[in-house]
Image (spheres, coloured by chain):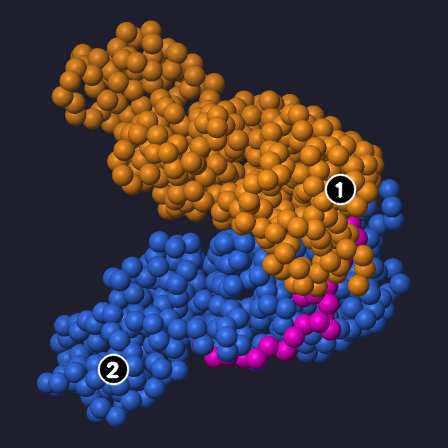
Chain colours: A orange, B blue
């Protein structure tokens, strides 16, 4: 049996403990699959005294991740600390500089510094693997980079933040308003310390930017992701979308258009009977459309100890087997800088607004839509007890820019109450 | 740029032509991803004169696949001819003997000879890759072998014959009997020359036996697959299952039990609102349950030119990158001979039968069930115009053997008309 592959594990939170459990429980099975034993030689974490429910005896303890990354008895630096600056970044740089491969679950780090780190890794003949950074245990990075490498990718889509999907599902099932379910989710510990990472779409956008890079051979461009959170979604939106056969999802979409790379992480309507529409609760789903393979759908747990540790171990086992592909599928110096295109692909739109209950109000709105070149597919005015009339419009295909022009012009009519909501209807 | 990887392509049917299209259309993209160009140097097929709609100029033509497999200008032998004996087998053996890697879409060949071929390949330092052999474009082989390698697999399930799923979906949607939809499928060209390969479950069982081997580290044991086709499923079964919230699928299930390896390819009831229950038409789905990752679902086209060629090219690109894992995930000489266990795992069962319309008939059946130690969850007798009473029973958990004892004993009652139908209700 060849020499073991030695892991230095930075971070002993939920995921780090999960990695230790797998390595300890399945040592023999993993050695057989990897062709060599895999061991953990050293760890680092803030608190050396806390009981984490796993046996840490025999493992060297480093106070600082950078020191861990540089140890001679570490072949692969596994970073499951999180945070896109500071220790996680510095330790990753140190590991690569010391000639180690890196396995990371850190989407924020890669969304911000992935290109630079990939260049550093590849210049040193090393790689960074990050299956655990996107959609937890779902093997989407490997599928895109390897299994589907014969495809020109047309579009990548995904529900990649379980907390948002939980909130939207719970609103629908229980008929509760956003604010109440948000508080529930917070009480259940589902939200990040900064909840905007979840409900603002930032965490999911980090993930999307990594998928885009692989799918389209472009440099990671997190700044190019159009982002909109789920905070403006009302229970009315969910119900009315449902009446028309749609569900609302925080959906990431990346596609290469004639105008450039479009990356969106926004609430969208998808058909109830599509795989994305059927996805309830905290589960994740990624959809890849390739020119040969057609549509491939992958579904599974997007977070949690077991699923995330499973993804980390898949990467580690690959490295033990000698599988070392470029970080983003092609060499970093061949990745192109994509031109960001903001919602260039036209779509049907769901528009909800309240109008003053006044003769001709609806006609004014319809006229403005026509002026913007947008035709109406369906329009409904709901019954109302108070003075305002809830109006729902589904348009034929229009670009985001056209819709914005129309929304702006609605304000000139003097019949609009409050802000209209505009949600894209994604064809899936 | 390193030297090209040179393909020898055996078989110019739908899939072979698909491979040529991808290689020709995406040469530059593939070279970038694979780190080297991929070319086709030589081909073989029965008919050298037929126009296949692709440019074959510049490709050497071999009359016999074995000769193709031995050519010095071939690095990887790609076998997309089909058939588990004769040319496909001999050419694969010849390719391995000549030191080539093999990529194949041939599930029948591997289900029958996979273990021997894997031993030959690994003794020669080569490998056989077969992503295209199972569920078309769905990256299930790679996911099981690599991405999920840190998991002890609990169960693998799948709908892996699109034709059967098309037939069952069409029966439900159109309310047509099996025989009529079968003839439709034949007219549409969906059926193999020997339709029993599809509707008898043989093709899907071939695929399941390959997944089992990887999942459980056991030698391919196609003979150990319990097989039952969809020919006995009536439109009544589909409707009554639907009334109870289930759909009927030809479902493959492999799991390691205390009594051995259970492999089944049989019609089962699955909940309508589960991913498997929602799978309509010719699409395939594979579900993997791992001890860390939980449930992972992969869905996509299980057949067709593009999807199958996509899978072939994923394997070829891996070989070009130098990725060469053991054929079934661990070295062939480490694979264990599993003890076959016939439906050892207990389940709830759906039983349908017709009884003579006679006082006490139902009681006799219920008594026999009780005698077999099987308790009843639900029982319905449907209204009937003729002399026989349709009866539906859903049991609590019981093994296949217990159910068989009960079915046999029903015949002794003298009230049974015709053969009862027994379908497992799989928890998914």
**Is residue A354 placed above or below B321 in the rendered structure?**
above
Pinpoint residue A84: horizontal percent, then vertical percent.
62, 28
- Residue B28 shows in this picture: no
Pointer 2 chain: B
Based on the picture, tell me whether residue A30 belongs to the magenta stretch: no
Residue linked to disc 2: B370
Disc 2 versus disc 1: distance between alpha carbons? 62 Å
Pinpoint residue B318: horizontal percent, then vertical percent.
73, 52
Q: Residue furthest front?
A: A49
- The answer to whether residue A375 is left or right of residue A42 is left
Q: What element carries label 2?
A: helix
**Is residue B310 placed above or below B388 in the rendered structure?**
above
- The answer to whether residue B295 is left or right of residue A84 is left
Pinpoint residue A153: horizontal percent, then vertical percent.
61, 40
Pointer 1 chain: A
Q: Which is more toward the observer, B60 or A204?
A: A204
| SS majority, magenta | loop
- The answer to whether residue B215 is left or right of residue A280 is right
- In percent of the image, x 15 and y 80: which residue is there? B386
- The answer to whether residue A297 is left or right of residue B98 is left
Pinpoint residue A186: horizontal percent, then vertical percent.
39, 32
Q: What element carries label 1?
A: strand
Based on the picture, tell me whether residue B325 belongs to the magenta stretch: yes
Q: What stretch is highlighted in magenta?
A: B317-343
Residue linked to disc 1: A101
- In percent of the image, x 82 and y 42: which residue is there? A72
In what quadrant of the picture does the N terminus of chain A appear?
bottom right
- In percent of the image, x 17 and y 81: which residue is there? B362
- In percent of the image, x 62 and y 60: which residue is there? A26
């Amino acid at each position: 049996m060849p020499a073991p592959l030695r892991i230095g594990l930075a971070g002993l939170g939920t995921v780090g403990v999960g990695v230790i459990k797998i390595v300890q429980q399945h040592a023999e099975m993993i050695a057989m699959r990897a062709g060599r034993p895999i061991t953990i030689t050293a760890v680092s974490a803030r608190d050396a005294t806390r009981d984490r429910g796993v046996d840490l005896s025999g493992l060297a303890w480093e106070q600082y991740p950078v020191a861990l990354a540089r140890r001679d008895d570490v072949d692969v630096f596994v970073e499951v600390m999180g945070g896109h600056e500071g220790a996680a970044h510095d330790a990753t740089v140190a590991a690569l500089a010391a000639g180690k491969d890196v396995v990371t679950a850190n989407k924020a780090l890669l969304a911000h510094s992935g290109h630079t780190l990939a260049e550093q890794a590849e210049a040193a003949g090393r790689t960074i693997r990050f299956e655990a950074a996107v959609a937890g245990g779902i093997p989407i990075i490997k599928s895109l980079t390897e299994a589907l490498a014969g495809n020109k990718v047309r579009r990548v889509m995904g529900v990649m933040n379980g907390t948002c999907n939980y909130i939207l599902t719970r609103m629908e099932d229980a008929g509760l308003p956003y604010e109440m379910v948000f508080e529930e989710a917070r009480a259940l510990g589902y939200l990040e310390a900064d909840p905007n990472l979840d409900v603002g779409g930032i965490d999911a956008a980090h993930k999307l930017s990594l998928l885009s890079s692989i799918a389209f051979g472009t440099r990671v461009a997190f700044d190019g992701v159009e982002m909109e959170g789920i905070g403006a979604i009302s229970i009315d939106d969910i119900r009315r979308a449902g009446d028309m056969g749609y569900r609302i999802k925080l959906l990431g979409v990346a596609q290469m258009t004639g105008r450039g790379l479009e990356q969106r992480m926004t609430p969208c309507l998808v058909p109830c009977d599509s795989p994305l529409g059927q996805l309830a609760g905290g589960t994740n789903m990624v959809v890849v459309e390739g020119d040969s393979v057609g549509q491939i759908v992958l579904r599974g747990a997007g977070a949690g100890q077991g699923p995330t540790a499973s993804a980390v171990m898949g990467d580690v086992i690959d490295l033990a087997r000698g599988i070392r592909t470029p970080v983003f599928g092609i060499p970093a110096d061949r990745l192109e800088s994509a031109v960001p295109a903001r919602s260039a692909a036209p779509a049907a739109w769901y528009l909800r607004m309240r109008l003053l209950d006044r003769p001709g109000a609806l006609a004014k709105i319809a006229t403005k839509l026509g002026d913007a070149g947008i035709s109406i597919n369906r329009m409904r005015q709901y019954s109302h007890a108070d003075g305002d009339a809830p109006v729902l419009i589904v348009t034929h295909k229009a670009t985001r820019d056209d819709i914005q022009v129309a929304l702006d012009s609605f304000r000139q009519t003097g019949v609009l109450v409050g802000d209209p909501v505009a949600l894209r209807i994604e064809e899936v």
